[in-house]
Amino acid sequence: MNHARVARPDAARAWPARSALLLLAILCGCAYALVRGNSVNPDEARKIEQGIQDLRELSFKSSVPVIVMTPDQAEQAILEEIARDYTDAQLKTEGEAGAMVGLYPRGIDLKAESLKLLKSQIAGFYDSHRKEMILVSGNIDIGFRDRLAEFIIQRDLAGEMLLAHELTHALQDQHFEVDQQLEKLDDNDDRQLALKSVAEGDATLAGLGYAAGQMNDETVKILVARLDQLPAQFAALTAGVPEALSEPLIFQYSAGAHFVGEAFHRGGWKAVDELYRSPPQSSQQIMHPAFYFDHPVLPAGITISGYQQVIPGWQKDYENCMGALMIQVILKRNLGPDAPEVQLADRWAGDRMVVLRKGNKLTILWVVFFRDDRSAQRFAAAYGTALDRILGAGTAHHLQTRPSTVMVVIGDGANQYAALGAQVWKTIEIKLPPISAPPALRAAGSSSSLDSSGAALATGSGLIPGS
């Protein structure tokens, strides 16, 4: 259920003009093209490198080589990146656990599905380990009308936008050490997703702004409005791909650009830079920018313990935080996208999941905290019904609620829920964070120009005992 450390893919626009293949081949060979054959046009690359530094108001501390790979070479690079961060056994466990909670379909091959998604959409990426910018030959296809426009104005718009986008990632790497920040959040996918959304939103606006030739408030509003259409278009392109893989990927670009655009509105690129120093703490803040900028809504910290005394022999495989977006995906996938319970993701206030292993069996302990008790009760009722359908009688499972909190146990451990639940409820800690705004972005009296989500959700500080 990690989505964080694979080399950043840039989804190529895919409106192919199949009737114009000959003309496309002719146009792609023009002198202004960024990629010709298997090599990069060095003059064009240098021009874009300087241009993105000027636009983004950051300078490269070291040069970034730009190389061209075939699709097969790019696939191998992605496989190496996955292998660097995960073993096949880890991916198998995460796929199995995700299926148990209703995030993935049963029997998913998480590695194969992830690779298929990335391979189908990738046009280029910045390799933060090799410190190289990779362009994938033959994968930049923006359609006949846009290619014709490029021919008329003598600019490779798709190539420029792609390279400017990925060079922005190189600037992020050199100035803000994004990968190192992500590594520190290894047990919290939701915070990783929030930070990745900042990085992708930043690069998306910078890349599009470079192609547009300017960057100001009006440009940002236009770009963000157009990006609102991206999730629906991406869903059509990735039909058949598990939603838990495709939705977080496109979320980073569309919602990320929306969020970063709000920072730009408040203080230009300097305010965007501050997002890396005081990053958002949850996908919920990306979904609702006002929850970061105007009335901060931070997730609770949850610690699950006590289970070791009741079910000895079970070893912790990993623990994680699902977050509001992935809970929304679970609810949409199992209740339908229009189910009213999908909106409960907006009432999410924190969660923690512990996955235990004993031999080839898994037990999942998952605690979800909500802003109010009614939301917790509604979630338990709807999700409990969904689990009955997903798991049937073959997999033990149990849900129980306490004020504003839901505990979910799935797997063999649920057969001992009477003792297990009592012990975990007694030892669980839910720490509410203090209310504070990112100091550099606090704007008294200002309101979000890109989000009108309504009043802040209730938060406080202190410790909620599990008893």
Image (cartoon, grey):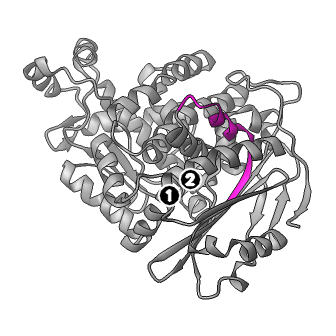
Occupied quadrant, residue 448: top right
Residue carrying label 2: 387
Label 2 secondary element: helix
| Residue 424 occupies quadrant | bottom right
Residue 280 in view here = no
Judge from the rendering whether residue 225 lies leftward or rightward of residue 104; answer left or right: right
* Residue 432 lies in the magenta-colored region: no
Can you identify the residue that label 1 sits on? 391
Q: Which residue extends farthest front? A: 393
- Tell whether label 1 touches label 2 (CB within 8 Å): yes
Instruction: Give the side of residue 461 with respect to residue 333, left or right.
Output: right
Above or below, 248 against 15 in this view is: below
The kind of residue on which mark 1 rests is: Leu
- Magenta residues (range): 337-352
| Residue at the image point whose x is 22% and y is 29% from the top | 33
Q: Nearer the viewer, residue 327 or 53?
A: 327
Asked if residue 398 lies left or right of residue 445, the reply is: left
